[in-house]
Amino acid sequence: MEKEYAEATELLYKGRKVKGMDFNKPEAFPLFTTTAFTMNSLTEVKKAYAEKYTYIRTCNPNRDALADMVTFLEAGEKSLIFSSGMGAITTTIMTILKPGDHVVCNRNIYGETFDVFTKLMPKFGISADLVDFDDIENCKKAIKAETKLIYSEVFANPTLNIADIPTLADIAHKNGALLMIDNTFSTPIAIKPIKFGADIVINSLTKFMNGHSDAIAGSITSTTEIIDAIHPVRMLCGTPGDPHAAHAMMKSFATMDLRLKKQMSNAAKLAAALEENKYVSKVNHPSLKSFSQHELALKLFTSNDTMSGMMSFIVPEDFEKIDKFMLRLNFAHYAMTLGGVRTTLVHPVTSSHSHMPDEARRAMGITPGLFRLSVGIEDVDDLIEDFNQALKVFGE
């Protein structure tokens, strides 16, 4: 038995078909856990380096397969998979910018992206101005001769302010700059920024695109020229994605369309219901007519039910009752992530924006009574009923 196993293994490693086993067109894409692919001659080595696989940090079939799926979804030319969304952002910026370059960035961005532009990049001689993109004139005024990049998220965290992607693309290209858009809150199921003029699209695949809160990865989608320039920097920075995470996400991608459309629809319906609740002073979701950028949302997205699974709402600033409200919720739970199949909420003043002065937070629309909500795939009537019953604590 041991001899037969050894012979079968030897045949497999030499690329021959093992008796009784056919690896042609597997129904589920295999997980390649190997850190390296072996060769038996220098001719094989040269061929492998040119067109096959060699070492896990350099190339891996699971990453490549996932990258192809992201490219298709984002309508780009090529994609790369990274160890995280932040790995995708930092590696890309280090590739496309050099000392002396300038970035115009939306001030309403993810806290760690904010730190990249204000704390990390200045160490490499790259400067950034963070301005309010709600008034597009602010972006135009911030442009300098050395501006090489305009950066924004589709939706701001946690107020969901929308970036006018076509206008930002026009500003960037007229000034010889690139437009980089973070599509994490919306995903390509809702919008494809490249079709609106964006040059580079980043996704934290960890969130909605994975959907199960069990794997971490990020992606960059762009032109072949830009992606090919990022690839060697990704190797040097050690930020390629893990094959296990890529394998898990490929399975998650199979249900992405179903999950995301349910989550986006649920969010729109829950937002409308919470807006009617007397204990909620404001709801932020682009599907609402009361949302300040509702008209822009209708231009960028196909319908109210296909915008985002993210929303935020404001309750009275009574921390004792806020605690009671959270304890009464049956479906939603607190979690420092988003995009999963279960509804989760976050209190930005206590977490993501805790380092900011209260005055600065309030200027951004973030009050001590604001909750950010990532809506899951639960029955929407159950969610509405649950939130309404929990909100009653503010009247007790």
Image: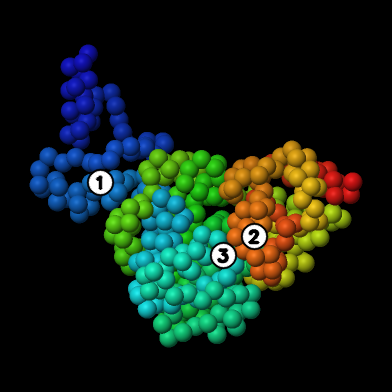
Q: Earlier in the sequence, mark 1 or mark 3?
A: 1
Per the image, the residue denoted by label 3 is 109
For label 3, the crowd category at 10 Å Cα-Cα, with few meaning under 14, some 14 to 19 and many 20 or more, is many
Whether label 1 touches label 2, CB < 8 Å: no
Asked if residue 163 is positioned above or below residue 316 in the image, the reply reads below
Asked if residue 185 is positioned above or below residue 134 in the image, the reply reads above
Per the image, the residue denoted by label 2 is 158
Q: Mark number for residue 179? A: none
Left or right of 112: which side holds 332?
A: right
Asked if residue 370 is positioned above or below residue 131 in the image, the reply reads above
**Location of residue 162 in the rendering, given as x and y in whole percent from the top left corner:** 63, 68
The local secondary structure at tag 1 comes to loop
Whether label 3 touches label 2, CB < 8 Å: no
**Viewer-side residue, 61 vs 232:** 232
**Location of residue 261 in the rendering, given as x and y in whole percent from the top left corner:** 63, 51
Tell me which amino acid carries mark 1: Tyr
Q: Residue drawn at (23%, 41%), measured in percent from left and top?
A: 37
Per the image, the residue denoted by label 1 is 55
The local secondary structure at tag 2 comes to loop
